[in-house]
Amino acid sequence: MKLSVGTDDVADLARWQASRRAQSADGLNRHVTRMWPKRGDEVLAGGSIYWVIKGLILCRQRIVGLEEQRGGDGILRCALVLDPELHRTASVPRRPFQGWRYLAPADAPPDLPPGREQEEPLPPGLSKALEEMGLL
């Protein structure tokens, strides 16, 4: 999981990534992190980054590669290479956190079924109440 700070919705994230993608030679986005994933093999075996937007997990993006990237300060970092397609998921509330977190497959929200990708997410309070009742 990763917070998408300053993003209003999934469409906003897609627009931002599309503008950044135009700047890369291979057309793929990279999300740079300080640390190399300790579970890199698992991440590359079908893992995704789940984007938290305004307190809700709303979408995921497959991680297709890990690359070393040296920053302007000379420090070696890890670039998560992301598939351009954003997959809308069921909205799940998440409290703020720093960095990024592993999400157990059993805790990952399901992708929205075809035809529901454009639905507005439920308000966080309603989503939480439905989840507590076992309805989500």
Image (cartoon, rainbow, N blue to C red):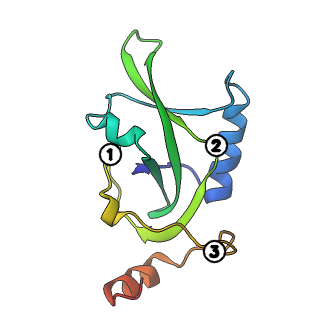
- The residue located at (43%, 67%) in the rendering is 109
| Image quarter of residue 87 | bottom right
- The residue located at (40%, 88%) in the rendering is 135
Position of 127 relative to 25 (above/below): below
Mark number displayed over residue 98: 1
Position of 110 relative to 65 (above/below): below
The residue under label 2 is 84
- Compared across the picture, whether 86 is left or right of 40 comes to right
Query: For numbered disc 1, what is the local secondary structure?
Result: loop
User: Sequence order check: which comes first, mark 1 or mark 3?
Assistant: 1
- The residue located at (69%, 21%) in the rendering is 25
Residue 27, how many percent across, how many down? 69, 30
Q: Nearer the viewer, mark 1 or mark 3?
A: 3
Position of 62 relative to 10 (above/below): above
- Dot 3 amino acid type: Glu
Query: For numbered disc 3, what is the local secondary structure?
Result: loop
The residue under label 3 is 120
Q: Nearer the viewer, mark 2 or mark 3?
A: 2
Q: Residues within 10 Å of mark 3 (few under 14, many from 20)?
A: few
Q: Nearer the viewer, residue 123 or 45?
A: 45
Q: Residues within 10 Å of mark 1 (few under 14, many from 20)?
A: few
Labels 2 & 3 near each other (Cβ < 8 A): no
Q: In whole angstroms, how far apart are the C-alphas of marks 1 and 3?
A: 26 Å
| Image quarter of residue 92 | bottom left
Q: Nearer the viewer, mark 1 or mark 2?
A: 2
Query: For numbered disc 2, what is the local secondary structure?
Result: loop
| Image quarter of residue 19 | top right
- The residue located at (49%, 61%) in the rendering is 54
Labels 1 & 2 near each other (Cβ < 8 A): no
